């Protein structure tokens, strides 16, 4: 699974990396070394402009935790932060988004936890690891997005009437990630970005093929501070080696 990740690049940098043609320069998200479910996250997606019919590549902020259009509550999203690559095309909660609303979620890397057995002097614990590309390049995590209308809000124009949410697709772990956890977020290779984002590309078999192999591999994993265990903690110190650990406070 993927329950936390790091996203520190500016929207200007992301717009350049992903060839984005439309984004709101007044919309800002703070850099985060501890992105958690229900946080707003940057996404790259393609939409058809109503006025011109042109497809534009956009940078948008989405709430992490997909809420299907038929859900009764926004809280549904907290349980739907990940979708399995093996079943995403068939699951009722994801299949419509898989066909038409795919996105990329930029990340510096992600966290996974490994169980550490108890010893005579220490209790059993979970050691967090930061897993990221060895070359330092941004990861383009495969995602889906949905629009959800809150039935409790009468007016469409009222803030909070509409929510844009997303989920991260996971696959079997490879490279260093596989030594820490059996699942990992699926990263899409740059050569496949256009095919993945294209809303007109709806052939399920071809789309599944894009999910067959994580992008390139070549991931590194290193133990980091257990301070990341607490979602209230944030900052570059979360990537410190365990020797510099100051606990969960």
Image (cartoon, rainbow, N blue to C red):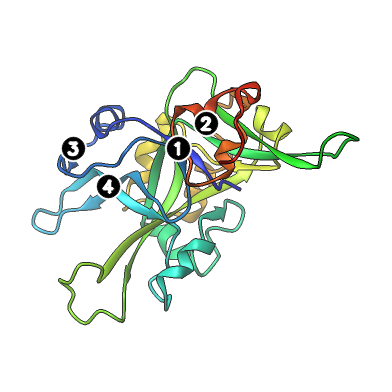
For marks 1 and 3, give the one nearer the viewer: 1
Q: Which residue is mark 4?
A: 60
Task: Give the mark, 4 or 1, whose residue is nearer the N terminus.
Answer: 4
- Crowding near the residue tagged with mark 1, few <14, some 14–19, many ≥20 C-alpha atoms within 10 Å: some
Q: Earlier in the sequence, mark 2 or mark 4?
A: 4
Residue at (65%, 21%) from the top-left corner?
Answer: 243
Counting residues from the N terminus, which is met first, the one under dot 2 or under dot 3?
3
Label 3's element? loop
Which residue position holds label 2? 238
Q: Which mark is residue 21?
A: 3
Quarter residue 83 falls in: bottom right
Q: Residue at x 42, y 28 (%)?
A: 138
Which numbered dot is residue 234? 1
Mark 2 vs mark 4: give the one in front: 2
**Which residue is found at the position 31% from the left and 27% from the top?**
17
Q: Is residue 246 left or right of residue 156?
A: right
Which residue sits furthest top? 135
Camera-nearest label, 2 or 3: 2
Q: Residue 194, percent across and down?
A: 34, 38
Q: What is the spatial separation of the Cα atoms under label 2 and label 4, in whole angstroms?
A: 26 Å
| Residue 118 occupies quadrant | top right
* Mark 3–mark 4 distance (CA, rounded to whole Å): 12 Å
| Cβ atoms under marks 4 and 1 closer than 8 Å | no
Asked whether residue 139 appears in the rendered view, the answer is yes
């Amino acid at each position: 699974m993927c329950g936390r990740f790091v996203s520190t690049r500016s929207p200007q940098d992301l717009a350049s990396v992903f060839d984005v043609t439309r984004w709101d320069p007044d919309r800002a998200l703070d850099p985060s070394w501890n992105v958690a479910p229900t946080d707003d996250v940057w996404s790259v997606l393609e939409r058809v402009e109503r006025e011109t019919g042109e497809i534009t590549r956009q940078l948008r902020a989405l709430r992490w935790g997909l809420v299907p259009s038929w859900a009764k509550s926004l809280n549904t999203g907290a349980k739907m932060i990940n979708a399995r690559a093996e079943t995403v095309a068939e699951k009722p909660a994801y299949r419509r988004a898989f066909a038409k609303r795919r996105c990329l979620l930029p990340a510096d890397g992600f966290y996974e936890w490994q169980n550490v057995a108890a010893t005579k002097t220490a209790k059993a614990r979970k050691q967090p690891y930061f897993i990221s590309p060895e070359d330092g390049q941004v990861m383009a995590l495969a995602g889906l997005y949905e629009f959800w209308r809150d039935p409790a809000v009468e007016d469409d124009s009222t803030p909070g009437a509409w929510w844009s949410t997303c989920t991260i697709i996971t696959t079997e772990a490879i490279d260093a990630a596989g030594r820490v956890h059996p699942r990992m977020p699926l990263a899409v290779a740059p050569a496949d970005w256009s095919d993945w984002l294209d809303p007109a590309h709806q052939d399920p078999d071809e789309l599944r093929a894009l999910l067959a192999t994580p992008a390139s591999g070549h991931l590194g994993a290193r133990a980091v501070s257990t301070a990341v265990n607490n979602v209230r903690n944030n900052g570059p110190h979360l990537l410190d080696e365990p020797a510099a650990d100051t606990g969960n406070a």
